[in-house]
Each structure stands twice: as structure tokens, then as C-alpha cells.
Image: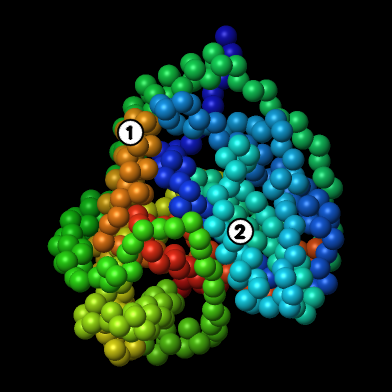
Amino acid sequence: MLRTTMDRMSPLDAEFFFAEHDNVPLHIGSVAVFDGPAPDYQDVMRLFEAKLPKVPRYRQVARTTPGQIFRPVWAGDEHFTIGHHVRHATVPPPGGPDQLRAVAARLFALRLNRHRPLWEEWFLDGLEGGRWAILSRIHHCMVDGVGGNDLMTLVFDTDPDERPPAVASWVPGPRPSPAARAADDVRDAITGPLRQLAAAPGLLRRATTQDVLDYGRGLGASARRLAEPSACVLNGPIGPRRRWTWTTASLAELKQIRAAHGGTINDVVLAAITGAFRDLLAQRHELTDGLVVRSLVPVSVRGPDEAGAVTNRVSAVLANLPAGEPDPLRRLSLIRQEMDDIKRTHQAVGAEILTGMLGLAAPMWLALGTRAAFRIRQPLVQTVTTNVPGPRAPLYILGRRLTRQAAAFTVLIVAVATSTLACSVPSLA
């Protein structure tokens, strides 16, 4: 007898899927700006369609069960149409940064259609100077910030004369029968927690005994960081609207600062973001000595053999951004000390182990708990700050060179009023 095995979401992917609601769209976004002239929309659409065979997930839709009794499964979309996912819009004149920000903000605020594969690419023309852009949106249940097989990265070329591949025909696989789906749901409900327990020793093996001991020793410092007064004024109810903006910085300058004062480029970026929060709080007359902005900092836990996995392999740590410190060099020093302590005590290890245990929870309780958590106002965390490596060499689409790329992670911590911050730099060294 042939047994059908479903491609089921991991517990962490399912958590991102369940957490989304009208005011919290849980997708990852980016905007890539290219030199002109703008290509034809049909050519852009054909290019993305030609790349789809490299990422089968982009032709799959999430199937759920009533009451979320079981984890969602991925199934081929029988009605897949490339025009539903590669869209076209024209930025209003004069096509400057303000107009691009406004268009991007409106698109990033929208939830993806759950009846289709959970991604969209928007071809935006009308930018000043004849330039154009690709705005990308992909749900966090499909991939994390450094996922290797993001479709947007696959359409890039390193040679401006590279010819796009031909579009191949595609036929979705047979849809499982209701009986086969029900049998697989029940089988996963029984064996899923057992597989999670069986995988626990491997997870613990990746975290050595010394890692766990260091983690335990670091819990005291983590508790003290949580006791510091944070900028709760930034916490509040989340509405449906979004604002999106960006700034640019020279990587050479970041490296000069790192060379002069130590730490990593990531530390320098966090210090710059801390200065921005200090300015914001000062403008609101809410700045006090010793005040911190508490940020969740995602940490990739992908192994060398997981570089191309289309799933979430991420943990996170909490970091205090010392916005109340007036001296910028002192701010950088405090951040460096804190991040060094977090790394030295392997605080991401504990979070990864806890995340790995999500599979022990029944999907229904996981869904209910996640939805409740994302609707309850909390004063603990004010923002999320993530640093995603950008391209190290010139990239092209249809012969046009990429000139700027900015990320927009719309994942929001529970009832955080401030926008999530993200930056893209070529290296985290």
C-alpha cells in the first residue's frame, strides 16, 4: 500500500504562521533598486517564472485543518498563476525617495493572501532617473532572514550579459485524498512529539556541556539586563498602518570605526541605531539617564549543511541598547561588552533549545498560545534589530545593476508600537 507523506511545517514555521493577524503581518520584505532603463513587466514576470523550479515551495500553498488541530502542510497550488505573485505598480511622480517609501509602506502593511503561495514580488517603475525597483514580500513561515533559497536572490546575476533561462512547463502533483490527509495528520500528531524527543539529544549535542554551563552562568547577567528601566513609552497597541524608511552608511566608515574602537560591525550598527532611538526619545521628552531600549536580536543557527534550507533556523537574544548614555563612544563600548557577554555565555543556545521543544506542544495549543501572545500588550521589548548580510559583489537583473537594497522585517514583538529595524551590510565580521 502506498503511503502519502505530507510536507509539513516545522513547529517554528507553524508558530510564525499562526501568529499573524490583521495588525501584525508576519512577512519579510526588501526593496532592491536598479539602474535604468526599466525592463518590460512581462520580461520581469517571465524571469521569475523561469526561476521557480529552483524553489518548489513558491508553488505551494499552506493547507490547514479546522481548529488548527494539526500543523499546516504544504501542497501544490492547482491554480497557481505567476501574475498573482509578480505584480506591477508605478511609483507616483517625481519618483523620489518619499514616493517610493509611501508605496512600499502601503504594500508592506498588507497581509499576504493565504489562499495562494505566501510570496509576492512587485515590479515598481517610475523612479527618478529612469531607475526601477523590486519589492519582495515572503511570509516568515517560509524562510528566515538569511534563508539561502529566497527567490529574489535566485534572479540575481553576476554577469550583466547573462541571458534569462526559458520558462519550463509545470504541473502540480496529485492532491492527497481526504483519507490520506487525515491519516497523515493523525500519524504526525502521534509521532511528531516522539520525533522531537528523539531529536533532542542531537540538539543538545550541538550545544556542548561547556556551552550549557556558560549559558547557566550568564543567566544572572541576563536577569539584571531585564531589570534595567526600558523605554516602555515606545510600547503600545499596534495598528494596521506602517511607515517604512531607510538610511545609508559607508561600509568603509563602519570598518574604520571598528578598527579604531574594537568590536564588530554589528556592534557599530547597533550603536548607530541606539543613537537614533536616543534622538527619538529626546524629541518626545522621554529621555532619562540610564534608559535602555530593549531589542530582540535574531541569531541564525543554520549549520553548514543548512545553507539552502527554505525554513526557519533562527534563535534570538535580548540586548539593551543604552539610549540614555550621552557619549557615543561609551554607547559603543557598552554594546560591545554586552554582546561579548551574550556570545561568551551562549545565550542563544537556551533560546534554540526552547524553540526546539515547540514540537512537543499540540498544534491547537501552539496556535492558541501564539495568537494570544501576539495580542497581549507587554512592556518588556521595544523593538527587533536584525543584521542581514548583503551582496559582496555587483549583481544584476536583466542586465540592470543593483544599486541599493534595504530590508523591511515586519515581524513585530507583542504590542510593540515602534517599527522593526533592519539593515543590510555585506559582512557581519
Disc assigned to residue 215:
none
Q: Earlier in the sequence, mark 1 or mark 2?
A: 2
Instruction: Say how the picture is coloured.
Output: rainbow
SS for dot 2 = helix
Q: Residues within 10 Å of mark 1 (few under 14, many from 20)?
A: few
Q: Which residue is drawn at 61% across and 58% down?
A: 107
Please state if 54 lies on the left or on the right of 179 as rendered.
right
Q: Quadrant of residue 191?
A: top left
| Three-letter residue code for mark 2 | Leu
Residue 303 or 281: which is nearer the viewer? 281
Q: Which residue extends farthest top?
A: 1
- In the rendering, at what x and y percent does residue 312 appear? 47, 48
Please state if 11 lies on the left or on the right of 405 as rendered.
left
**Residue 386 in sight in this render:** no
- In the rendering, at what x and y percent does residue 155 appear? 72, 57
Please state if 16 lies on the left or on the right of 351 as rendered.
right
Disc assigned to residue 107:
2
SS for dot 1 = helix
- Residue 267 in the image: above or below residue 86: below
**Mark 1 and mark 2: span between their CA atoms?**
31 Å
**Residue 232 in sight in this render:** yes
Residue 218 or 29: which is nearer the viewer? 29
Contact (CB < 8 A) between labels 1 and 2?
A: no
Q: Name the residue under label 1.
A: 365
- Residue 233 in the image: above or below residue 315: below
- In the rendering, at what x and y percent does residue 115 appear? 61, 37
Q: Which residue is drawn at 42% across and 45% down?
A: 19
Q: Residue at x 83, y 64 (%)?
A: 39
Q: How crowded is mark 2: few (under 14 residues within 10 Å), some or many (20 or more)?
A: some
Please state if 236 lies on the left or on the right of 79 as rendered.
left
Q: Residue at x 47, y 88 (%)?
A: 256
Quarter holding the N terminus is top right
